Amino acid sequence: FYSFVRVDSKRGGSESMSVSDAIPADALQLEEEQTGSTTIGALWFVVIAFMFFAQHHTCDAYFVPAINVFADKMRASPNAWLRRWGQESVAGATICALGCNGPELFSNLIALYTGSDAGIGVVVGSEIFNLLVIIGCSVIVAPIVPLHLERIPFTRDCIAYAISIVLLYGALRDRVIQFNESMILFGAAIGYVAAVYFTQDFEDWLQGAAKASVASTESTPTSQGQIKRGNSFTVQPGTPSGSVKVPHMASIHGVQVEVEEIYHGRIVDGHHTAPHGMKVSATESGIYTKELDPKKGFQLESADGALLGPKLAYDNLKEVIVMGFGVIELEFEKGFMGGFLLEHITLKLTAATTADRDELLESIKANAGLAWVHRYDATVKGSWEHLKHSLADKDLSVFLKIFFCMPEFLIDSVLRITLFKCDVKDITKENRWPVCFLGAMMWLAFFSYCMLECANAINANIPAIPTSFLGITVCAVGTSFPNAVASVILSQQNKPAAAIANALGSNVQNVFLAMALPWIIYSANYNFQDIPQNVAGIQEGILWMVGTLVLVVIFVLIPPGFCALTTTYGWILNAVYLVYVIITMGETFGWWPPLIK
């Protein structure tokens, strides 16, 4: 029987003390009995998947919309400095980054308070998944290869990501996080925001210098207001869903409206730098520009302009939502994967008057087929009506109705009970966006806590699977899955550069925000004490972060050209992630020794 010596500092003596005296009886009983069940542990995987879905739904339904309202208000500000903060590039690197990295941030924060090893693993695992899988899949499904990247933003993000890895390694090298180390990481986040803020100015300066050089050589005056190639769509890193809204003036059934394309999935498409007009008509087969073939169904712009591709058929129009102030929202949905909608776009039509809206609504009803036409209800009643409509939808399989519609109803109902008074999707409540933002933050924190507890429950029932492994693999993939799905869709629509820029930008802010901010909050809450971070596999994870970045940089430097990626490189990146998972599993289950002890 093991024993140890307890020293009494007051009396200067010591006494022998058994383990049973030092360890609580319930802890001894738990350790001795080891009553964990593999079956119960497997069921906890289902629960943790539900938590992933809850995090994603909270982000997409409340967290990101509140962020979008903030960006819109900054963009409409009369102050020039505030207007620039509303630009997608700057907003995407600051408050909008929370929309992409919210689950990782709250997972790390909650893990600090619960003592879980999974929190920091979620962030590190997401970094590796984003760089290998998102970039790899984006290149594989891209319709045009080799894929050419924008040189200056790509170089900027690679340098920032390399700096974030160096700072993270320096902070974790001694296995404790000091407050000043957290502040350095947070300061680097501010530096990255400044770099994004002035990137366009830098590009304009380079472009001006190049024009001046050509003018001095050819003695030919340059034209004013020339549009730079590639600027019709601007890719912004780390921006969550919906924050890029592309306004168009259109005429539908003779009613002049403004159309906004709103993409869902916590990762965004590019956007037009300025509004442009178009003529839009409606027929039995869909809505289309009058120069195009009506058989193509819905087509808002050019062949690659719409976020969901060249056409949106009426067959995919699932809902017509009547809002206030002359607004109608058309919800197009198509395809499912793992319970997530693969393609989801909202078209927000704003008429000048309520009468114009009602006239347009009647025309849409005549052509919308089986689409559900209703007014938006932010209460639980709205969630119940949505469930009833989904269950009656003959296009949805029984599997999706049970494993997608029912969980969505449960999550949405809970969120609506607490947030219906500040739901910014109801445009009459947009001024309440700070309350919606804070409420969504609280729910994200709660679902992150539940996710980490599920990881602990899996470990308790299947002790061979440590929480650190669950964090760096299962939880990391679960929180990043919506980003990966959205990236594949963007790439299929010939916009893979948007997905790649978001993957890199999101990784930078994952370190600078999702790690640094929880460390700052936790340390300040405990008198700025050092935070132990001796989590198994983290240093090896950082080594993988370095290796994957180096691999991507090598691929863009070697043929077929500078800043170009081929399909072969995409398959290699995905294969490397598979190797990473296999190596991590082998180390976890003792098949071979770890690369770094």
Image (cartoon, rainbow, N blue to C red):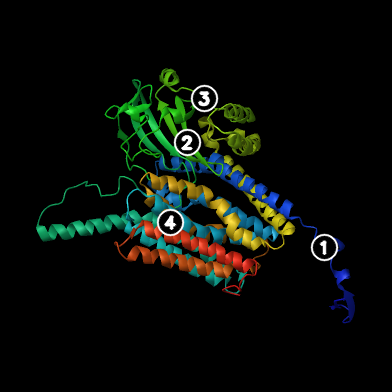
Q: Which residue, given by chain and number where applicable, does mark 4 sit on? A: 136
Q: Residues within 10 Å of mark 1 (few under 14, many from 20)?
A: few
Type of the residue with mark 2: Lys
Residues at circles 4 and 3 in contact by the CB criterion of under 8 Å: no
Q: Which residue, given by chain and number where applicable, does mark 2 sit on? A: 334
Cα–Cα span, label 4 and label 3 = 38 Å
The residue positioned 56% from the left and 64% from the top of the image is 582
Callout 2 secondary element: strand
Q: Which residue, given by chain and number where applicable, does mark 3 sit on? A: 372
Q: Which of the two discs, 4 and 1, labels the residue nearer the N terminus?
A: 1
Type of the residue with mark 4: Gly
Q: Residues within 10 Å of mark 2 (few under 14, many from 20)?
A: some
Cα–Cα span, label 2 and label 3 = 15 Å
User: What percent of the width, then of the height, locates residue 56?
Assistant: 56, 45
The residue positioned 32% from the left and 35% from the top of the image is 301
Callout 3 secondary element: strand
Type of the residue with mark 3: Trp
Q: Nearer the viewer, residue 143 or 379?
A: 143
Q: Nearer the viewer, residue 480 or 160?
A: 480
Q: Residues within 10 Å of mark 3 (few under 14, many from 20)?
A: some
Res. 182 in view: no
Callout 1 secondary element: helix
Of badges 4 and 3, nearer the viewer stands 4
Q: Which residue, given by chain and number where applicable, does mark 1 sit on? A: 27
Cα–Cα span, label 1 and label 3 = 55 Å
Q: In the rendered view, tell whether residue 538 sits above or below residue 378.
A: below
The residue positioned 49% from the left and 70% from the top of the image is 166
Q: Quadrant of residue 156?
A: bottom left
Image quadrant where one finds the N terminus: bottom right
Number of numbered discs on residues: 4
Q: Which of the two discs, 4 and 3, labels the residue nearer the N terminus?
A: 4
Would residue 578 appear left or right of 568 to someone viewing this image? right
